[in-house]
């Protein structure tokens, strides 16, 4: 494994206990350095989302381990892992997953509230982040008042709320039209230029061609890792 | 509970007008139906329409039986003109009350020290009967009563046939007992142990009706309350817990939020129920407040039962189940 790796996946296997058991990932190992824009790509059902969930500590591997900045997930209790997830990892999901009862800025501020930040401080940063994603004027709107593209940008701002070490996005453009998808990708690239490490699970070729790292999966196995300058 | 949880819970409640209203109304509906059904069951089991006057001639022995384990509302048994039972306020859980009306001249022969014109004796497990100055009271076992007032004792003093020495109106009988079964035509020998058994059977049969009815009603109302809890859990899980998990809320915190969310919805519904019950009591003759006081904690319990499964899901960090539709349990 690379010493400078931010995220290390060590011989990870994930078996879902459905019926006789479904092996979603098989002995996958890779190391993602800090500051890269990586995509995990492959056909549907190849294990992209599973790998992302394991990287983000949303799920535990059946075998193997994952390390973020040297900390092995297997050594953490559920509560500690949740704290690491909250503090060190930002998530963007295909379905946006914004809390419908909270305003856009409150959705962005929520992870900060969870970290114990005061309302004033959290609101100030949330509004700043929304400005960064081009939604300054939509901060006081509920999710249902926003378009799909706007909701996903709010989700992106929320993912950055606690200044995570790594940002994981699971098919972030999957529910967006091409214009909104391009807008979101521009945003993610901007995050990357600012030094953010990103891992995106996608099968969108437009996203893949922008990545420095291309991690190809097939049938739950790592087939190839391509790197570009 | 952490500060942000309280804030989030109140924001949820304040900002989901349709959802909050639905849950609130469901809770109130479950509580009000539970209270109403309970009230109805109590009414049907606790009171019967006014019983026609029952004439018991002086010297006759009458008996009231009630099923074991039931409460006999003795205060509802009134014997007009006599004042003998009007002062009775004691309840007894089971047993047999036998009262004997005797002519004044018979009492000395029975060894009584008369205090007034009437005579009255209670037997069985009746803890206390205050019968006033006109009455005669003695507590004891049924066997004791039979010993004192068995047929051999009572037979010498039957009232002359067709000449009742006093008329007593029994206005209330034990619920559900057919008043006809108490009608006595003047022959003291009717009240033999055999007649008592018949009457006991009638009482037991009558008692089973309200009991079964109450049990069914309680079951229906409880199902409503549990269903309400389950719905609260369902809505809570479906609408926002995936989003909370995506924002980084941990499984144990989601569990607390879910329980808090449920309790808040039931608390708000309970407030509405209390207001409704209060308004009903104030403006109508329907007094549901006592039943509401029972139905509210039951609904809380039922609502918590309803969120057990969602709680288990979120508490065990099964956040992916909340995040992905196809994996949602």
Image (cartoon, rainbow, N blue to C red):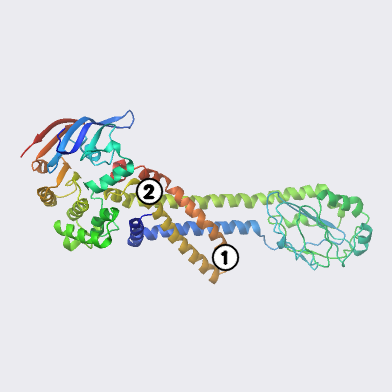
Residue A219 visible? no
Quarter-wise, where is residue B75 in the image? Answer: bottom right
Can you say which quadrant of the picture contains the C terminus of chain B?
top left
Does residue A12 sit above or below B209 in this rendering?
above
Nearest the eye: B310 or A204 = B310
Can you say which quadrant of the picture contains the N terminus of chain B?
bottom left
Nearest the eye: A197 or A5 = A5
Q: In the image, is B187 to the left or to the right of A143? A: right
Q: Where is residue B301 in the image (x, y as percent from the top left)?
A: 49, 51
Does residue A163 sit above or below A81 in this rendering?
below
Task: Tell which subunit mark 1 falls on.
Answer: B
- Mark 1 burial class by Cα count in 10 Å: few <14, some 14-19, many 20+: some
Secondary structure at badge 1 equals loop
Secondary structure at badge 2 equals helix
Query: Do the residues marked 2 and 1 share a common chain?
Result: yes
Q: Mark 1 points at which residue?
A: B287
Q: In the image, is A104 to the left or to the right of B178? A: left
Which is nearer the N-term, disc 2 or disc 1? 2
Residue B255 numbered tag: 2
Nearest the eye: A105 or B125 = A105
Q: Where is residue B85 in the image (x, y as percent from the top left)?
A: 77, 63
């Amino acid at each position: 494994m690379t010493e400078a790796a931010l995220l290390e996946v060590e011989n990870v296997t994930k078996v879902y206990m459905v019926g006789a058991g479904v092996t979603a990932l098989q002995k996958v190992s890779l190391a993602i350095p800090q500051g890269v824009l990586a995509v995990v790509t492959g056909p549907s059902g190849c294990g992209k989302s599973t790998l992302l969930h394991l990287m983000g500590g949303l799920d535990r591997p059946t075998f193997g381990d994952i390390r973020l900045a040297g900390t092995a997930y297997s050594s953490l209790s559920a509560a500690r892992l949740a704290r690491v997830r909250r503090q060190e990892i930002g998530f963007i999901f295909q379905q946006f997953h914004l809390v419908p009862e909270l305003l856009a800025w409150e959705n962005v501020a929520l992870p900060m509230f969870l970290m114990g930040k005061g309302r004033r401080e959290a609101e100030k940063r949330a509004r700043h982040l929304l400005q960064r994603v081009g939604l300054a004027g939509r901060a006081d709107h509920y999710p249902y008042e926003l378009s799909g593209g706007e909701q996903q940008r709010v989700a992106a701002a929320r993912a950055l709320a606690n200044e995570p070490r790594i940002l994981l996005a699971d098919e972030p453009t999957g529910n967006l039209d091409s214009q909104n998808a391009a807008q979101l990708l521009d945003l993610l690239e901007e995050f990357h230029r600012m030094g953010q490490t990103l891992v995106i699970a996608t099968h969108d070729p437009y996203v893949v061609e922008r990545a420095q790292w291309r991690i190809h999966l097939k049938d739950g196995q790592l087939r190839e890792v391509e790197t570009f300058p | 509970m952490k500060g942000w949880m309280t804030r989030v819970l109140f924001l949820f409640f304040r900002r989901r007008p349709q959802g909050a209203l639905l849950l609130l109304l469901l809770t109130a509906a479950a509580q009000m139906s539970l209270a109403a059904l309970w009230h109805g069951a109590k009414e049907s089991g606790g009171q019967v329409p006014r019983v026609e006057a029952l004439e018991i001639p002086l010297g006759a022995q009458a008996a009231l039986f009630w099923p074991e384990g039931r409460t006999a509302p003795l205060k509802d048994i009134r014997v007009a003109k006599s004042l003998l039972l009007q002062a009775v306020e004691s309840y007894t859980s089971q047993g047999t009350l036998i009262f004997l009306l005797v002519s004044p001249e018979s009492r000395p022969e029975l060894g009584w020290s008369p205090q007034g014109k009437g005579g009255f004796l209670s037997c069985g497990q009746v803890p206390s009967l205050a019968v006033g100055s006109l009455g005669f009271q003695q507590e004891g076992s049924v066997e004791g009563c039979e010993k004192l007032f068995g047929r051999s004792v009572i037979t010498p003093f039957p009232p002359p046939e067709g000449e009742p020495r006093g008329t007593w109106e029994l206005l209330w009988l034990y619920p559900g007992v057919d008043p006809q079964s108490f009608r006595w035509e003047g022959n003291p020998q009717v009240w033999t142990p055999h007649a008592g058994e018949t009457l006991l059977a009638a009482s037991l049969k009558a008692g089973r009706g309200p009991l079964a009815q109450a049990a069914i009603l309680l079951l229906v109302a409880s199902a409503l309350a549990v269903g309400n809890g389950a719905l609260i859990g369902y809505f809570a899980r479906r609408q926002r817990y995936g989003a909370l998990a995506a924002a980084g809320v941990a499984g144990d915190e989601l569990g607390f939020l879910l329980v808090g969310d449920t309790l808040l919805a039931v608390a708000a519904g309970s407030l509405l129920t209390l207001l409704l019950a209060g308004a009903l009591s104030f403006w109508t003759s329907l007094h549901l407040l006592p039943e509401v006081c029972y139905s509210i904690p039951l609904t809380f319990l039922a609502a918590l039962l309803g969120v057990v499964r969602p709680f288990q899901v979120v508490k065990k960090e099964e956040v992916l189940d909340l995040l992905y539709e196809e994996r949602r349990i």
